[in-house]
Image (spheres, grey):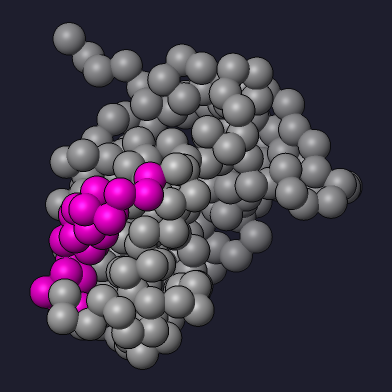
Amino acid sequence: MVNPAKIRLAALNVWFKDTHALKNISLEICPNEILGVIGPASSGKTSFLRALNRLNDTQPNFRMDGDIELEGENIYKDIDVNELRRRVGMVFALPMPLPISIFDNVAYGPRMSGIRQINRLKEIVERSLKEAYLWDEVKERLRESAFKLSGGQQQRLCIARTLALQPEVILFDEPCSGLDPISTAKVEEAMALLKRSYTIVLVTNNTKQAARVSDRVAFFLMGELVELDVTDKIFTAPKDKRTNDYITGRFG
């Protein structure tokens, strides 16, 4: 039996004032997969990602039509936006730790959702840091400022902070764009393990990263979904010449 889609988009269009950022996007994201999203600048990748937890709504002159469903529920009609953003977490390109301790960064979300028992918070913090591949590096430093961590460690801390709320889907917006190769490898290792429990959507400008970690890849160009297929096919035998031109470096 085929698993139902975790997220389904049907004829999604997004505008910011007169800019048609996404054009008639229809696709399904499967449970426990890493969907890589690639394409040149201004192709609609980030607008697509932000549509999945309604972050586009915060932009001026935003409008849309079409449908986005999370496990069959319309995210505009059936799910409160705060609940949606708990279920669909996001990790941004630049790490943004809070100006508090490592422990309190991870515990912040659970505390805001009403969890106060210190033993429960300790369990959540340890689990989340382990899932983000950071526990062994910080377990003796939990009361130190998060700003003392390296850039790569701060990014994994932000992943842990997202995981603390136990979302169903994690959106990554170029999470390794400012990281060195070693830190990038650790984030990629974390993603590979996380897909056992979570559905992941990864926007990346690094086609090699998409090839390494994604199960399927979507290629966007000028707001259109040009091609979506399993990763091997996208990178070895794409159906559309524009996809081939992009991944071989002819443009973008």
Residue drawn at (46%, 25%), measured in percent from left and top?
A: 70
Q: Which residues are magenta?
A: 115-138
| Image height of 148 relative to 1, above or below | below
Foreground pick, 107 / 84:
107
Instruction: Say whether residue 76 is left or right of residue 61.
Output: left
The spot of residue 194 in percent (x, y) is: 21, 49
Magenta run includes residue 236: no
Residue 161 appears anywhere in the view: yes
The spot of residue 27 in percent (x, y) is: 47, 28
Q: Residue 106: name its quadrant.
A: bottom left
The spot of residue 83 in percent (x, y) is: 52, 33
Foreground pick, 160 / 14:
160
| Image height of 1 relative to 83, above or below | above
| Image height of 116 relative to 93, above or below | above
Residue drawn at (70%, 33%), measured in percent from left and top?
A: 13
Residue farthest toward the left in the current orientation of the protein: 136
Foreground pick, 99 / 10:
99
The spot of residue 12 in percent (x, y) is: 64, 29
Instruction: Say whether residue 96 is left or right of residue 75.
Output: left
Q: Residue 216: name its quadrant.
A: top left
| Image height of 63 relative to 130, above or below | above
Magenta run includes residue 127: yes
Residue drawn at (44%, 59%), measured in percent from left and top?
A: 108
